[in-house]
């Protein structure tokens, strides 16, 4: 088997050298580390959390309104590090403001920068108003905020559009490149990011509501998780299965195989789903099971972003993979 594999690799290498210049990469390799991976994770989490809170308020899911406020607090907390991560990743961080000089609708990066800024302003204003109402005594400040309620309500609804964009625009950014793993199935990669964003948003919201003893809301969120985890699993599996065989290799090669199998599949999906199902069947009331499941889902979502980014980097330096996407 070793000899057959060596012969095939030699044949592939000779074939590649016939169509490339001494097996050199055809495109430049993207150099995105943990700063961008963390940004992808937090940005999607922030957008999905805000949407969950907005929907909960619109349908009166929680009559007290606490769930909507919790979701907005989580959303803003995860959004604040995003611009910092993007600025730190720049080669010249002091020039970050140049991204806001002009809006290029054909550039996912330019559109994403503006959407991030608009979402931050709108959600920041609404969430700050919620926070001030809770910490300040009844008086002139609350009267002033009450007078601004119509504008704040409008801002809360308007922020839903950029929040939705936040859940998938980073996948569009990846798919717009020439990196084989990212662009070969450009339509399915955003679905992976959307499902992962909502799965992680439900997990962190369930975790917070469990800690703050919002038991009724937490029970409903756990029920949603029991549906969201299988959906996330199917979407990721569909993305992997629809990739060409030569590109699928990069998702299951070396260290990425361990991260994808152990981190994404087992820790992020199979274990938490099993724990939640056992808890539901036995009607157990141990909150720690739900909390551990939520932490596992969050780790799996972060691992999923890592696998997608690093698999893309590997495919970018392989001329055979680049030519595969042109067939």
Image: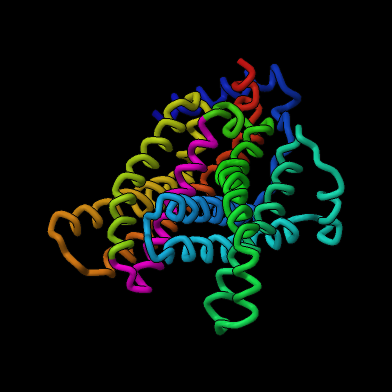
Q: Let me know if residue 303 appears in the view.
A: no
Name the side, left or right, on which 325 lies relative to 258: right
> Magenta part mainly helix, strand or loop?
helix
Q: Residue at x 62, y 59 (%)?
A: 152
Q: Let me know if residue 296 appears in the view.
A: yes
- The magenta stretch is 188-215
Above or below, 108 against 20 in this view is below
Foreground of the two, 298 or 100: 100
Report x, y in % for residue 2: 42, 31
Q: Residue at x 74, y 61 (%)?
A: 88
Name the side, left or right, on which 223 lies relative to 56: left
Q: Residue at x 14, y 54 (%)?
A: 281
Looking at this view, name the residue that lies furthest to the left: 282
Name the side, left or right, on which 100 lies relative to 143: right
Foreground of the two, 80 or 278: 80
**Was residue 142 drawn as part of the magenta stretch in this picture?**
no
**Was residue 191 drawn as part of the magenta stretch in this picture?**
yes
Q: Quadrant of the C terminus?
A: top right
Foreground of the two, 216 or 295: 216
Above or below, 220 against 108 in this view is below
Report x, y in % for residue 231: 36, 40
């Amino acid at each position: 088997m070793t000899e057959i594999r060596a012969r095939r690799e030699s044949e592939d290498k000779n074939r590649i050298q016939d169509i490339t210049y001494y097996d050199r990469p055809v495109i430049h390799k993207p150099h995105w580390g943990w700063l961008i991976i963390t940004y992808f994770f937090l940005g999607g989490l922030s957008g999905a959390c805000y949407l969950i809170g907005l929907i909960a308020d619109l349908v009166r899911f929680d009559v007290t309104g606490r769930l909507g406020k919790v979701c907005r607090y989580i959303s803003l907390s995860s959004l604040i590090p995003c611009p910092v991560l993007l600025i730190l990743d720049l080669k010249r961080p002091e020039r970050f403001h140049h991204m806001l000089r002009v809006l290029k609708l054909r550039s996912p990066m330019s559109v994403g920068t503006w959407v991030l800024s608009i979402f931050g302003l709108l959600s920041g204003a609404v969430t700050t108003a919620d926070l001030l109402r809770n910490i300040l005594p009844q008086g002139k400040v609350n009267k002033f905020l009450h007078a601004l309620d119509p504008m704040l309500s409008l801002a809360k609804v308007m922020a839903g559009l950029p929040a939705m964009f936040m859940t998938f625009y980073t996948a569009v950014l990846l798919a717009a490149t020439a990196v084989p793993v990212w662009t070969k199935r450009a339509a399915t990669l955003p679905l992976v990011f959307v499902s992962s964003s909502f799965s992680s948003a439900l997990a962190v919201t369930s975790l917070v509501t469990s800690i703050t003893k919002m038991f009724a809301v937490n029970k409903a969120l756990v029920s949603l998780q029991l549906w969201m985890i299988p959906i996330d699993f199917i979407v990721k599996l569909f993305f992997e299965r629809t990739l060409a065989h030569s590109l699928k290799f990069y998702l299951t090669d070396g260290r990425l195989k361990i991260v994808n199998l152990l981190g994404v599949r087992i820790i992020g999906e199979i274990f938490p789903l099993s724990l939640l199902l056992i808890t539901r069947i036995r009607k157990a009331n141990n909150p720690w099971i739900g909390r551990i499941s939520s932490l596992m889902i969050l780790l799996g979502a972060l691992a999923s972003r890592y696998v997608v980014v690093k698999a893309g980097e590997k495919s970018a330096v392989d001329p055979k993979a680049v030519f595969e996407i042109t067939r």
